[in-house]
Amino acid sequence: MTNDTEKIKQAQKILDAAFKCISTRGYANVSLRDIADEADVVLSQLNYYYKNKEGLFTEIVKTLSAQYLNEIESNLKKGESGKERVACLIEYFQGVLRTKPELFTLIFDLSSMALWSEPLKKLLNDLFNDLTDLIEKYITNDFLDREFFKYESSATLARLMLGALFGTSIQVMLANGKADMIDSLSALKVLFEYDSSNQ
């Protein structure tokens, strides 16, 4: 049991080091040796636990996906209505951009890598599908009775919202986290506050 616990700790140490290296330097600028040095382990241990570079990054995507999904669902549950949950989701994205921008740096970098790797592509596609499902469940289903949305499915609206959040977030990252750009995410609320039936 002690040996298994030690293996888990060592594997996690390597994963944490990889996360740190990639989120601060980018995938293209990080080698397995860099990660081994950061984790203070010999290079062969990375191969032992993760087989190869793709195996290591696959595990990073799995870990990151679980974290994102858990945090986002927890935030969505704070709202009591679709409108409140829109605000909760936007505030989550704004908070991450202000306090943990490396999470977005990592997911954007991994998304770029996924274009050339089928295993990573599947994992990231699953993540975006799961995020869309959460938004549909907690937000867009509440708005389908509105005239403004009557021609769109709740899944389409959820994808639109997710795309707007991630698209604006990457612009924020490219602009070095400018506060006014982070605040611009709040404009998404307008779409869900508008109700043409009241006009």
Image (cartoon, rainbow, N blue to C red):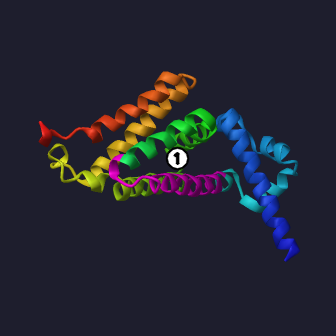
Q: Could you tell me residue 85's position as x and y percent?
A: 40, 49
Viewer-proximal residue, 135 or 85? Answer: 85
Pick whichever, 120 or 171, lies toward us.
171
Residue that extends furthest to the bottom in the rendered view of this protein: 1
| Residue 181 falls within the magenta-colored stretch | no
| Quadrant in the rendering for residue 108 | top right
**Label 1 Cα neighbours within 10 Å, binned few <14 / some 14-19 / many ≥20:** some
Q: Amino acid at mark 1?
A: Ala
Q: Residue at x 16, y 49 (%)?
A: 150
Left or right: 26, with 115 as reference point? right
> Which portion, as a residue range, is magenta?
57-83
Q: Give coordinates of residue 42: x percent, y percent.
A: 88, 51
Tell me which corner region of the image, top left, top right, bottom left or bottom right, holds residue 3.
Answer: bottom right
- Chief secondary structure of the magenta portion: helix
What quarter of the picture does the N terminus occupy?
bottom right
Residue lying at 38% horizontally and 47% vertically, measured from the top left: 84
Which residue is denoted by mark 1 in the rendering? 114
Quadrant holding the C terminus: top left
